[in-house]
Amino acid sequence: MERTLTKDSIEYIDNLLITNDKAVERAIVALYKLQTPEEQAGKRTNDRNGIGFNQNDAPLGTYCAKWVLSGKRLSGPYLDKSRQLALRYHRQLSVIAKNNLSMYRG
């Protein structure tokens, strides 16, 4: 019996992130929006709450999210790094998709 993937399944999200550049951009912005305003401004993580970017990923994630939010598209190494970053956060993205949070809709 073949399993049907739902839009909130990790496998579906992984496939989407691997094959769709716009999904990578939306994922980075969604994760950025989970950061507190202080974390966004400082390009860092203050709270170890498992929400948004971790301390190591916050500078790149914030930079890329702000780039996308300014109306530009990610490309080249920034798109590649953002794709890798988003794939690391597939569980959070699954929760976002499951709850239909508007921040994921970009």
Image: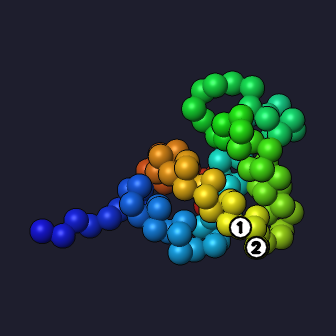
Image mark for residue 9: none
Residue receiving disc 1: 79
Left or right: 46 with respect to 20? right
Image coordinates for residue 51, horizontal then vertical, percent: 60, 35
The reply, left or right, for residue 23 in relation to residue 9 is right
Q: Residues within 10 Å of mark 1 (few under 14, many from 20)?
A: some
Near mark 2 (Cα within 10 A), the count class, few <14, some 14-19 or many ≥20, is: few
Question: Mark 2 sits on what residue?
Answer: 76
The kind of residue tagged 2 is Gly
Residues at circles 2 and 1 in contact by the CB criterion of under 8 Å? yes
Q: Secondary structure at mark 1?
A: helix
Q: Position of residue 39 (x, y in %)?
A: 79, 34
Q: Answer with the quarter of the image where residue 52 lies.
A: top right
Give the percent coordinates (x, y) of residue 66. Answer: 83, 55
Amino acid type for the residue under numbered disc 1: Leu
Residue at the (53%, 75%) spot, across then down? 19
Position of 14 with respect to 71 (left or right) is left
Say if residue 39 shows up in the picture. Answer: yes
Examine the rendering and report whether any part of residue 104 can be seen: no
Q: Find residue 69 and report its image quarter.
A: bottom right
Q: Is residue 7 above or below residue 94?
A: below
The chosen color scheme is rainbow
Query: How many marks do you count on the picture?
Result: 2
Name which residue lies at 41% across and 55% down.
10
